[in-house]
């Protein structure tokens, strides 16, 4: 589970962007902002129109055959040997670590292993490959960061999330209680065990609200959908934002 | 599935009980903290965990040979070895030993395998009184409950609840809620029993094949009393507890005590080699070792699931589990609760009975991150979810395929068609975004504590095109 230290390539000329289904439908601006962040560093970004979903929902529900069919479709979208950037720890984890498991013993096994090596979660790509460091143009703000469990434990990029926020001079990061703890989303878990999930998101939200942040930032839209959905239900004014959108908003001259 | 309903009901009740919520949360927070302090250096910890994994994986890779070697060496040392394929067999082995000595009382140290056997219940039916001597076990035995945690069986109760219970059960002792005084009182009660009971029973943490040594890790000294004061000592354990060499023990012990309670070492660490030898003044005259299978050899046969058997029962996975911390151990309804229970128990009882437990996890990975022998618990939960739904006949897991429901399977099939056919997907997304105003505001269980998510006006597919990003 724990990510071993990864050797990062030099800055490429082109990358693919895999937006993820949640971003596609619920947070498309996060996808656009992620692509802008990369393109601004002089890298050409390709967004294949045939992409859909990484297949994780079926994989985590025990429907491997269905997951495999969908995973095959995704892999066919990225034929050239460019890095593939994913603005989500959990979808990146799926493609990087679980695709090889999913195709174990299948005829594509070795191609899938090579494919998995090309997967980068957005923040690790920004920090280690593009080495971005832009000036913060925004007003002082206090934000809380919720790093998803897959970003933290599977992709091992919690530190990268923090580093990107720490680069922003006027941004104060509010530390919250048990920040390593899961928000209770877990995909179909939230549907199968709604009461346990509810207890988890309630306590996560309590911890966040206690610090009085002006925004909750996350690199995963599953967590955002869960936490902000609950905050709205509580009629809290605290809003959530994907880290890509937050970074773009803070560093892009025309937007702020 | 009745079990599903039971699990849902039990967790519903636990979630609605503020005392349970508070007791577990604060106890788990404390244990998490202690473990963290016990492993100050990340790199050293990771290396130790690798070593722990290797030791246990090595032992499992030669399990049959090591068990044979263990038996041989135990017998050489004078320990009588018994094999039990089922809990019934194990119970009868213990009963036979009791009967042979005409023993009506059994004093017990903490043993999760005896819980697995439901030994107390079984022996009581045969007129034998069982006395738990571990403080936590002693407490829950007073109210006829099961352990809610594998190393801290009464963790679901707080100090004041225990004080009240003692006062009810032992009215002759003046009320106190001071932990030390309560412990001393319990000790006094138990001391007397130790002198009376002719047979003592304990678990085993590690059984060393090379030397025929049984290692017992504990904090209260009651384990040592059980193994030394009565004339007969019975040790019960699962076959997966065997390790190859004596030199494997220091690593495992360091991992176990630090992961469990954050202690560098427990107050007592016992290595039992033999019964009383001639010329010795104390120790039991007979030592028995009962080795229980109960489904373990089936788990042993699967190349992936075998890592379930590496578990050294430290409890760290439950301490760190956000689900366990909220619903507590009893909600699981199994001998072993928490993340390890959710992979182990369904394999033993069958997915038809306990197939719901592998779904009771967000796969957050907190368990695997702390497990001292690096059991990839989320991966195995995922595997069991697959086994539960698989349709072919090749599944080796008990109850494989039992959870497949045509409605759910059809939904996933439709999901597959939609997501493996890009034009269809794009049309679908376009329709949904255009009709977003018609989206229902109630989405089943999701909206019980959340507002429904808002569908975007335009999808990323559309925006990417509008923004001029190339598509190939
Ligand atoms: S699975 Fe790992 S963490 Fe959990 S009790 Fe067993 S050894 Fe400890």
Image: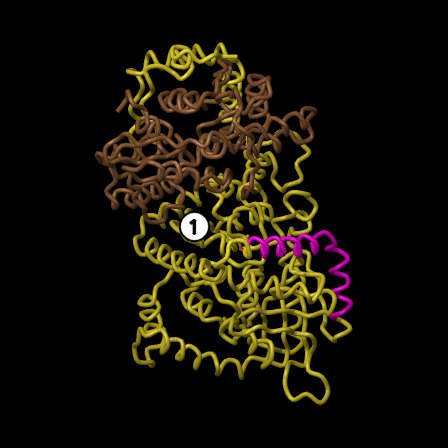
- Quadrant of residue B224 in the image? bottom right
Q: Colour of chain A?
A: brown
Q: For this rendering, which residue is in front, B74 or A210?
A: A210
Q: For this rendering, which residue is in front, B168 or B319?
A: B319
Residue B293 showing in the rendered view: no
**Left or right for B140, reference B402:** left
**Left or right for B177, reference A24:** left
- Quadrant of residue B390 in the image? top right
Residue B70 belongs to magenta span: yes
**Where A156 sits versus B97, above or below?**
above
**Where A80 sits versus A91, above or below?**
above
Q: For this rendering, which residue is in front, B337 or A179?
A: A179
Q: For this rendering, which residue is in front, A88 or A40?
A: A40
**Mark 1 falls on what kind of element?**
helix
The color scheme shown is by chain
- Ligand 1's quadrant is bottom right
Percent position (x, y) of residue B199? Answer: 60, 77
Percent position (x, y) of residue B208? Answer: 69, 66
Residue B134 belongs to magenta span: no
- Under 8 Å from ligand 1: the CB of mark 1? no
Task: From the image, tell me which residue sits under label 1.
Answer: B324
Residue positioned 48% across, 16% down in the render? A47
- Quadrant of residue B304 in the image? top right
**Where B415 sits versus B405, above or below?**
above
Residue A243 showing in the rendered view: yes
Q: Which residues are magenta?
A: B46-74
**Where A64 sits versus B372, above or below?**
above
Chain identity for the colour yellow used in the image: B
Report the magenta stretch's main SS. helix
Q: Chain of mark 1?
A: B
Percent position (x, y) of residue B263? Answer: 49, 66
């Amino acid at each position: 589970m724990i990510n071993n230290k990864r050797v990062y390539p030099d800055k490429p000329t082109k990358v693919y962007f895999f937006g993820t289904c949640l971003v596609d439908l619920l947070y498309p601006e996060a996808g656009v902002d992620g692509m802008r962040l990369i393109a601004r560093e002089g890298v050409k970004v390709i967004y294949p129109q045939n992409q859909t979903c990484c297949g994780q929902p079926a994989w985590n529900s025990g429907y491997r055959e269905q997951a495999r069919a969908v995973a095959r479709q995704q892999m066919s979208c990225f034929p050239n040997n460019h890095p593939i950037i994913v603005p989500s720890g959990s979808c990146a984890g799926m493609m990087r670590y679980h695709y090889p498991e999913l195709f174990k013993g299948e005829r594509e096994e070795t191609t899938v292993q090579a494919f998995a090596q090309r997967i980068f979660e957005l923040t690790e790509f920004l920090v280690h490959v593009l080495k971005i460091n832009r000036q913060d143009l925004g007003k002082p703000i206090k934000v809380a960061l919720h790093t998803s469990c897959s970003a933290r434990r599977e992709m091992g990029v919690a530190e990268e999330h923090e580093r990107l926020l720490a680069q922003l001079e006027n941004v104060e990061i509010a530390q919250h209680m048990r920040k390593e703890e899961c928000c209770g989303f877990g995909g179909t878990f939230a549907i199968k065990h709604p009461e346990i999930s509810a207890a988890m998101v309630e306590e996560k939200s309590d911890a966040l609200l206690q610090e009085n942040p002006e925004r909750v930032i996350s690199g995963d839209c599953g967590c955002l959908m869960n936490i902000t959905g609950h905050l709205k239900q509580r009629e809290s004014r605290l809003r959530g934002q994907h880290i890509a959108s937050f970074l773009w908003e803070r560093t892009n001259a025309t937007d702020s | 599935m009745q079990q599903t309903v039971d699990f849902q009901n039990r967790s519903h009740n636990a979630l609605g009980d503020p005392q349970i919520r508070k007791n577990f949360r604060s106890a788990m927070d404390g244990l998490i903290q202690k473990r963290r302090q016990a492993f100050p250096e990340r790199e050293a910890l990771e290396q130790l965990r690798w070593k722990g994994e290797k030791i246990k994986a090595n032992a499992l890779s030669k399990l049959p040979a090591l068990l044979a070697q263990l038996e041989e060496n135990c017998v050489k040392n004078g320990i009588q070895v018994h094999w039990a394929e089922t809990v019934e067999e194990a119970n009868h082995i213990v009963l036979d030993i009791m009967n042979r000595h005409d023993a009506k009382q059994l004093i017990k140290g903490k043993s999760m395998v005896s819980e697995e056997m439901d030994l107390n219940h079984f022996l009581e039916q045969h007129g034998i009184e069982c006395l738990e001597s571990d403080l936590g076990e002693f407490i829950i035995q007073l109210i006829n409950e099961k352990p809610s945690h594998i190393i801290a069986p009464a963790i679901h109760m707080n100090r004041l609840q225990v004080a009240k219970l003692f006062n009810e059960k032992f009215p002759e002792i003046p009320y106190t809620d001071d932990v030390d005084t309560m412990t001393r009182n319990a000790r006094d009660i138990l001391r007397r029993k130790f002198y009376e009971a002719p047979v003592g029973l304990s678990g085993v943490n590690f059984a060393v094949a090379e030397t025929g040594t049984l290692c017992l890790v504990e904090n209260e000294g009651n384990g040592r009393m059980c193994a030394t004061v009565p004339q007969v000592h019975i040790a019960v354990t699962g076959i997966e507890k065997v390790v190859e060499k004596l030199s494997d023990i220091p690593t495992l012990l360091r991992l176990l005590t630090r992961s469990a309670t954050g202690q560098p070492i427990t107050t007592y660490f016992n290595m039992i080699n033999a019964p009383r030898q001639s010329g010795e003044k104390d120790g039991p005259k007979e030592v028995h070792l009962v080795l229980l299978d109960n489904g373990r050899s089936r788990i042993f046969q699967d190349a992936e699931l075998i890592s379930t058997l590496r578990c050294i029962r430290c409890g760290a996975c439950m301490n760190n589990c956000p689900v366990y911390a909220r619903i507590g151990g009893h909600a699981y309804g199994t001998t072993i609760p928490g993340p390890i229970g959710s992979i182990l128990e369904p394999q033993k009882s069958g997915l038809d009975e306990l197939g719901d437990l592998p779904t009771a996890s967000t796969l957050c990975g907190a368990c695997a991150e702390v497990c001292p022998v690096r059991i990839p618990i989320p991966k195995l939960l995922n595997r069991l979810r697959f086994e539960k739904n698989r349709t072919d006949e090749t599944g080796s897991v008990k109850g494989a395929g039992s959870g497949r429901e045509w409605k759910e399977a059809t939904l996933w099939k439709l999901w597959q068609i939609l997501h493996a056919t890009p034009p269809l997907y794009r049309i679908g997304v376009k329709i949904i975004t255009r009709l977003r105003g018609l989206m229902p505001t109630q989405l089943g269980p999701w909206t019980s504590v959340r507002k429904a998510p808002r569908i975007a006006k335009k999808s990323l597919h559309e925006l990417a095109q509008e923004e001029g990003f190339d598509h190939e």
